Image (cartoon, rainbow, N blue to C red):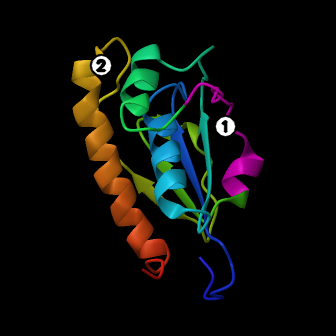
Amino acid sequence: MTDDPTTVPEVLFVCVHNAGRSQMAAALLHHHAQGRVRVTSAGSAPADDINPAVRTVMAEIGLDLTTAFPKRLTTDAVEAADVVVTMGCGDACPVFPGKRYLDWELTDPAGRSAEQIRPIRDEIDARVRGLLTELVPAPPS
């Protein structure tokens, strides 16, 4: 992270398939940050599509993932990020000096119902809000 207040921090969320946890985290941070943070997500072994139940639980809170799609994790994406948040991707994420790495242990929503995914979404939301307060000051009221 830089000490320059004009620099917008970049956060990369990574999980294995980029079809659930990392997509929810990216959408939530993008929503809460309101342009104060650049947000990307990727997977070490991306799925073909986003988990339909994940799309459902995100739509319930007004976040539309219909145009989102799983993306492959690249070295360039990690290099561009100030903060890399991993969610069960093991050792697949390259490590670079000067980056902040966080590992969030979260239940994988794969194969779960919307009812089972809602608590995962809510836990991700709480963590995202906490990260946002560390990265940037609150917007003026």
Classify 58 as above or below 112.
below
Residue type, mark 1 in image: Leu
User: Looking at this view, is 29 or 141 the one in front?
Assistant: 141
Name the residue beneath numbered marker 2.
Answer: 114
Q: Please identify the residue farthest to the right as the structure is shown.
A: 76
The quadrant of the image that shows the N terminus is bottom right
Q: Is residue 75 located in the magenta-colored stretch of the structure?
A: yes
Return the x and y of residue 56 as percentages of the image width and height. Answer: 41, 22
Q: Position of residue 139 (x, y in %)?
A: 48, 77
Identify the residue at the far front of this view.
141
Q: Quadrant of the C terminus?
A: bottom left
Q: For the residue marked with disc 2, what is the amino acid?
A: Ala
* Res. 106 in view: no
Relative height, residue 112 to residue 64 (above, below): above
Q: Which residues are magenta?
A: 65-79
The picture quadrant where one finds residue 68 is top right
The residue at 60%/54% (across/down) is 95
